[in-house]
Image (cartoon, rainbow, N blue to C red):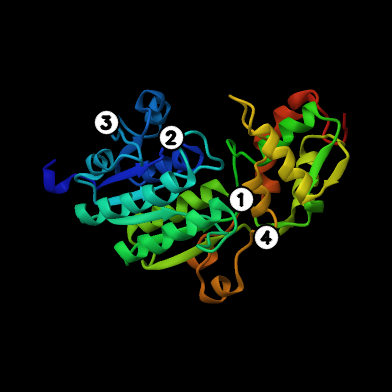
């Protein structure tokens, strides 16, 4: 095979993360050569079986250091940025990772002549009171100014085997006699399957998604926070009472726990601010076809997948009768 006939090279930033690993698999199935750019390549070896021998390679990169970003995109025809953080730790701040880092990736992609797909989030807004939403929004603006043909994907909460939402509360249900409903559990979500997001990314890399637009990715149903937890409890065969927790109290708890070294807080004040707003696909995106359906992807129901990976949270694992509860 000559160099001219080699499959295109795609650099995936954050390819070892929750969404990133599914993106890598979707691209590998299509035959792309993939360069996974991560801070710890030595911990990303589990991705190699997703492709053929030599199809997936690794490079060290940190979004806080521009030189490592340039090295990671060198020779790539497409760049995918899956990097995002749910809470700040040390130097990994929202500003550094989600704004500065995303801008640097866009500039590097432009310099390499590569197309760009960026994963943002519903709730991204440069004027958001939340640091997470604000930096996501500023990043989108910067990216489109640098790469006007970029594809930006905004998912709602993402579910799948390694998710940090249903897994978190299912694990909490094993330990705690109650489960908290922040703000009364009224916040609306549109849970989207990680494989559907990966397929949307792959189609963007294929050149089948129009650039210069922001797409909002949500599942086939809108669920309140309460309904999400009720669904999880049903799947895990548990009956933990759901107790309303005012936003102010949740924020205070998050602030206190955040002060404890080496402990990941169950919720942060910034996440509480995000929960004050619904996390669903906008009417404008629906009308303009900037959704999964608009991309020709049929959204996956959460209930059809949750059972496959939440089963080990049941009182007796797979041996628990689905009609019983602890």
> Are the two marked residues, 2 and 3, in contact with CB atoms closer than 8 angstroms?
no
Left/right placement of residue 56 relative to residue 214 reads: left
Q: Residue at x 55, y 51 (%)?
A: 131
The numbered mark at residue 54 is: 3
Q: Nearer the viewer, mark 4 or mark 1?
A: 4
Query: Which one is in front, 146 or 286?
Result: 146
State the residue position of label 1.
157
Mark nearer the N terminus (4 vs 1): 1
Q: Residue at x 51, y 58 (%)?
A: 154
State the residue position of label 4.
277
Query: Which one is in front, 60 or 18?
Result: 60
Mark nearer the N terminus (2 vs 3): 2
Above or below, 43 relative to 63: above
Cα distance between the residues tagged 4 and 2: 29 Å
State the residue position of label 2.
16
Above or below, 247 relative to 258: below
Cα distance between the residues tagged 2 and 3: 17 Å
Mark nearer the N terminus (4 vs 2): 2
Mark nearer the N terminus (4 vs 3): 3
In the picture, which quadrant includes the C terminus? top right
Q: Nearer the viewer, mark 4 or mark 3?
A: 4
Left/right placement of residue 220 relative to residue 247 reads: left
Above or below, 99 relative to 41: below
Q: Residue at x 20, y 54 (%)?
A: 111
In the picture, which quadrant includes the N terminus? top left
Cα distance between the residues tagged 4 and 3: 45 Å
Q: Secondary structure at mark 3?
A: loop
Q: Nearer the viewer, mark 3 or mark 1?
A: 1
């Amino acid at each position: 095979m000559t160099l001219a006939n080699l499959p295109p090279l795609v650099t995936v930033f954050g390819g070892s993360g929750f969404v990133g690993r599914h993106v890598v698999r979707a691209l590998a199935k299509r035959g792309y050569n993939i360069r996974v750019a991560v801070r710890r390549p030595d911990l990303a070896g589990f991705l190699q079986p997703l492709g053929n021998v030599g199809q997936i390679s690794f490079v060290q990169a940190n979004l806080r250091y521009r030189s490592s970003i340039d090295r990671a995109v060198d020779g790539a025809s497409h760049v995918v940025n899956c990097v995002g953080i749910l809470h700040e730790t040390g130097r990994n701040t929202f500003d550094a990772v989600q704004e500065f880092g995303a801008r640097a990736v866009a500039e590097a992609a432009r310099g390499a002549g590569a197309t760009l797909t960026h994963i943002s989030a519903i709730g991204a807004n440069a004027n958001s009171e939340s640091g997470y939403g604000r930096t996501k929004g500023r990043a989108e603006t910067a990216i489109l100014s640098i790469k006007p043909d970029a594809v930006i994907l905004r998912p709602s909460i993402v579910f799948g085997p390694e998710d940090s939402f249903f897994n978190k509360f299912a694990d909490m249900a094993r330990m705690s006699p109650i489960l908290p409903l922040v703000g009364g559990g009224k916040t609306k979500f549109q849970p989207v399957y990680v494989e559907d997001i990966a397929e949307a990314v792959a189609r963007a890399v294929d050149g089948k998604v129009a650039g210069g637009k922001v797409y909002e990715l949500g599942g086939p149903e809108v669920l309140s926070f309460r309904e999400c937890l009720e669904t999880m409890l049903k799947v895990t065969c548990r009956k933990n009472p759901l107790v309303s927790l005012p936003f102010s109290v949740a924020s205070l708890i998050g602030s206190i726990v955040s002060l404890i070294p080496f402990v990941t807080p169950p919720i942060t004040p910034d996440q509480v601010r995000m929960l004050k707003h619904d996390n669903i696909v906008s009417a404008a995106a629906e009308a303009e076809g900037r959704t999964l359906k608009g991309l020709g992807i049929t959204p996956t129901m959460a209930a059809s997948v949750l059972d496959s990976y939440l089963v080990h949270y049941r009182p007796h694992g797979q041996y628990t009768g689905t009609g019983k509860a602890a």
